[in-house]
Image (cartoon, grey):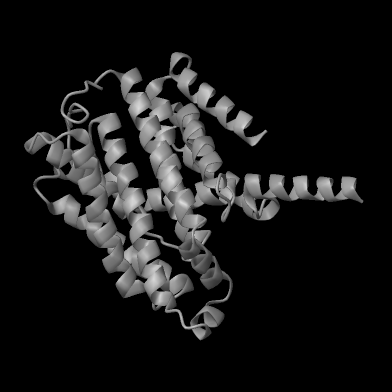
């Protein structure tokens, strides 16, 4: 049954660009990766990073700069940008993981604001105008993927790769220790592990994958702007994760797809999109504390137990 559902999902994903605007689909895929990277920290380690956008935006600029000035192939630019974000995540984690809760969130927010103003003042970023004209170079230097529909399949493959990497982390012994830290950090420490070390590594993985999403997004739109580094994007990814279901594997994907689709539909109404997001956040906090996927899973378990009884 599970294999059949996976095959159905793959078939739908392959057919979608013939019915839906490819740019919208690629935007959703980029934010699926981004939200999943954030959920790795919040849902599985219990760390609220209120600066996740710095990894998304910084990598967008780095990938764009490499593609515009060096002529490297697209996969090299994306991987290099993700690596820089992972290293930055390790540094931020080294400074911040000794704090928890709101203190950790505020430290990450401070770092994000520093990155924002650094990019604003840097000449190579284009300041408030952003970095324009980022080329879609050939894959491996030989495969032309400039067409939007062809590029969609590249982004889809990269999304599958990133999600698989997150799945492997979550279901590895390392992932089990992360969940144990989330549930009872003192007990993990009493067993001889060093929680700070695991948190820093988790921060690096999360930042690297968020950077991967940012670099991919820059090649989709062929520009990078300060909006990607702003605190509003960090807040938006929190909403995506809470809406879908924090600590669930598919929840952030559902939340990201829903919010991006909503933003696209409400774009013509300007600020109403932000108001709609605020209303959704209030409703989620009041009525869907486990998110859409979390509540659906809980309902399914109750029905199954009732049938067994």
Instruction: Residue 189: tell me if it is visible.
Output: yes
Determine the residue positioned at 76% across, 45% down.
300
Determine the residue positioned at 19% across, 31% down.
140
The answer to whether 208 appears left or right of 143 in the picture is right
Instruction: Residue 97: tell me if it is visible.
Output: no
The answer to whether 138 appears left or right of 178 in the picture is left
The answer to whether 282 appears left or right of 143 in the picture is right
Q: How many labels does the image show?
A: 0
| Image coords of residue 231 (percent x, y) | 36, 54
Q: In which quarter of the image is residue 125?
A: top left
| Image coords of residue 7 (percent x, y) | 56, 27
Against 149, is 159 above or below?
below
The answer to whether 154 appears left or right of 15 in the picture is left
Determine the residue positioned at 58% across, 51% down.
248
Against 117, is 308 above or below?
above
- The quarter of the image holding the N terminus is top right
Task: Return the residue nearer the eye: 3 or 288.
Answer: 3
Determine the residue positioned at 31% across, 24% down.
151
Q: In which quarter of the image is residue 164?
A: top left
Q: Which residue lies furthest to the right in this view?
A: 309
| Image coords of residue 89 (percent x, y) | 30, 61
Q: Residue furthest bottom?
A: 190
Against 11, is 188 above or below?
below
Task: Return the residue nearer the eye: 187 or 65.
Answer: 187
| Image coords of residue 101 (percent x, y) | 48, 72
């Amino acid at each position: 049954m599970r294999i059949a559902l996976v095959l159905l999902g793959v078939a739908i994903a392959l057919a979608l660009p013939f019915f839906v605007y490819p740019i919208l689909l690629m935007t959703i895929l980029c934010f699926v990766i981004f939200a999943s990277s954030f959920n790795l920290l919040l849902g599985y380690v219990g760390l609220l990073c209120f600066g996740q956008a710095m990894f998304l935006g910084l990598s967008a600029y780095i990938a764009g700069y490499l593609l515009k000035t060096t002529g490297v192939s697209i996969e090299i630019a994306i991987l290099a940008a993700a690596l820089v974000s992972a290293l930055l995540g390790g540094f931020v984690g080294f400074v911040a993981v000794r704090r928890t809760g709101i203190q950790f969130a505020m430290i990450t927010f401070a770092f994000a604001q520093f990155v924002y103003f650094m990019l604003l003042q840097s000449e190579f970023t284009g300041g408030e105008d952003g970095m324009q004209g980022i080329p879609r170079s050939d894959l491996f230097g030989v495969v032309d993927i400039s067409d939007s529909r062809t590029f969609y399949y590249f982004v889809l493959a990269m999304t599958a790769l990133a999600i698989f990497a997150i799945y492997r982390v979550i279901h590895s012994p390392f992932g089990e220790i992360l969940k144990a830290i989330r549930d009872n950090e003192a007990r993990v420490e009493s067993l001889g592990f060093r929680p700070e070390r695991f948190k820093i590594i988790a921060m690096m993985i999360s930042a690297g994958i968020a950077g991967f999403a940012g670099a991919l997004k820059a090649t989709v739109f062929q520009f990078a702007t300060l909006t990607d580094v702003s605190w509003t994007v960090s807040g938006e990814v929190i909403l995506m994760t809470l809406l879908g279901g924090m600590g669930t594997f598919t929840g952030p994907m559902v939340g990201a797809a829903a919010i991006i689709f909503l933003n696209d539909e409400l774009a013509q109404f300007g600020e109403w999109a932000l108001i709609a997001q605020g209303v959704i956040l209030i409703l989620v906090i009041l009525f869907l504390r486990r998110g859409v996927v979390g509540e659906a899973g809980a309902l399914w378990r109750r029905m199954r137990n009732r049938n067994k009884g």
